[in-house]
Structure formats: C-alpha cells, structure tokens
Amino acid sequence: MTAGTPALELRAVTKTFGHVTALDQVDLEAHAGEILAVVGDNGAGKSSLIRAISGVYRPDSGSIKVDGAEMHFQMPTDARTAGIATVFQDLALVEVLDVATNMFLGQIPRRGPFADRKRMERESRAFLDELKVTVSSVRSEVGMLSGGQRQMIAIARALRTGGRIVLLDEPTAALGVRETAQAAEMIAGVKERGNAVIIVSHDMGLVFELADRIQVMRLGRVAGVRATAETSRDEIIGLITGSIVE
C-alpha cells in the first residue's frame, strides 16, 4: 500500500511567524490509496501544515514533492493545479447558490455568453451519484441542505476539480452521529478511488476507523508516526500530550 513514490512528500518543512515556529523540520508522506490522519492538540501545527501543503503558506525551508516532483507553491491555485484539493472546515460553499453551481464555482462552463446550466446539472448529478452522495436535486440551494450533505458536496467538488491528493480539515467536526457515519463512508470511497487522503481530526473514533497511518504533531514537530493497526488510542494520546516521547 505504501510502496513506491509517495503521492505527496514533505521533507524538513519549516515555517515561522516572527519568533514563533509553527512548523519545525516537518516530514510527511501520503500515498495513493491511503488515508493518513494528522492529529495533535491545539497549537500543534496541524493547521499550519495543511496551509503549507495547500499553498496558503510558503514554507521558509524544506521541500514539498508531488509524485516525486518538487513543487514551489506561490498561492493556492498552484497547489490545485498540482492535484492537491483542500476542504477547509468552513467548506467555502456559497449557501445561496444551488448544488450544481457550487460544484462548478470558478469553472463555470459556457454556451456563448451564458452559463451552460444543463451541462452543470447533468455532470453534477452523475458525479454525485458516482460518489453515492444523497441529494434530492442539484438545483437545491446549499443553504437548505444538512451539514453532512454540505460536507460531502465540498469533498465532491474537490474531486471534480482534479484533486488526486485530498486534504480534509476536521471533516466531521460539526456533524451528528448519522452524518459522521455517512461522511466516513464517503471518505473511505475516496480512498478506494485511489486518491491519497489526509484528514486532520480530533475525532479519535473516526481516525481509528478510517486511517491507515496516524501522524502526531506536537509543538510544531512530528511527535511520531504509527500504522493504525499497530498502535492504540493510549499510545496516540501519549504522543499528543508528550507523556510518550520518541
């Protein structure tokens, strides 16, 4: 599963803000067909890590490689072009627009001077059906949907725009039990499609259900990386709190 060149590889990535070191010599590997969970307490560097990978932050040093090729992201569009799709916690959906329009934001197809509504609706419906996302109509306003449906539409949009490496920031933080289970099923399906998936989550139940490997961040450093099948919640919590030190 983890053989061959990683889909995404970070080596010694460092990011500082004044006197604060947000990321300190951070390594990371994510492979196609794998889910990597990144966990840690508040202030551990998880958000800075996601922003460095997605092109929001430019590292001060270190390297980021996609499929073995070194990348230098100047902005988020560079990361998207390289095949990295990030779904932040706020989802970045426009609630007053319908599902089809949200799926094509920034890439609206045209027929002459007008948006090609039929194509947007047809392709959105087909793509959501492929991912088994339950939405009664792609003409529904996103603001009328449940939190779980909005989360799944945001993930689907990331995949539709070509994301081979999918970063999910707290994908179930605002969801109930039933919606969390639905989102987990979809995330597992994204892995089965052959994507490399990175989830940042405080939900240890979700992490141990979905992740193949777990990377623990603490105070901007990598505290440890474990194969999920070979570790326990107690060990991961120990790495998070610092009671276990490598």
Image (cartoon, helix red, strand yellow):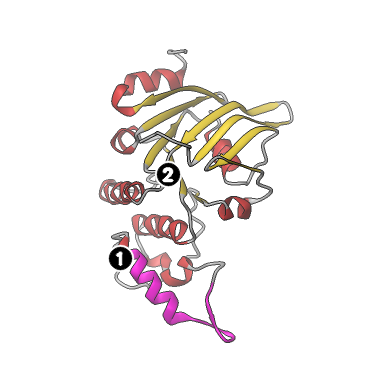
Residues in magenta, as a range: 108-128
> Which residue: 31% across, 46% down?
188
**Mark 1 closeness class: few <14, some 14–19, many ≥20 residues within 10 Å:** few
Decide: is 219 above or below 133: above
Residue that badge 2 annotates? 196
The answer to whether residue 93 is magenta is no
Task: Work out which residue is located at the far front of the displayed protein and give it.
Answer: 4
Mark on residue 170? none
**Mark 2 closeness class: few <14, some 14–19, many ≥20 residues within 10 Å:** many
Q: Residue 91 placed where, x, y %?
A: 48, 54
> Which residue: 47% across, 71% down?
101
- Asked where in the image residue 213 lies, by quadrant, the reply is top left
Q: Secondary structure at mark 2?
A: strand
Q: Residue 89 placed where, x, y %?
A: 48, 48
Which amino acid does the dot numbered 2 rest on?
Ala
Q: Count the marks: how many? A: 2
Q: Secondary structure at mark 1?
A: helix
Q: Looking at the image, do the residues carrying marks 1 and 2 touch, with CB atoms under 8 Å apart?
A: no
Instruction: Tell me: 74 left or right of 112.
Output: right
Q: Residue 205 placed where, x, y %?
A: 30, 34
Instruction: Tell me: 188 left or right of 225.
Output: left
Instruction: Tell me: 228 left or right of 71.
Output: left
The answer to whether residue 112 is magenta is yes
Which amino acid does the dot numbered 1 rest on?
Asp
For the residues labelled 1 and 2, the Cα–Cα distance comes to 21 Å
Residue that badge 1 annotates? 129
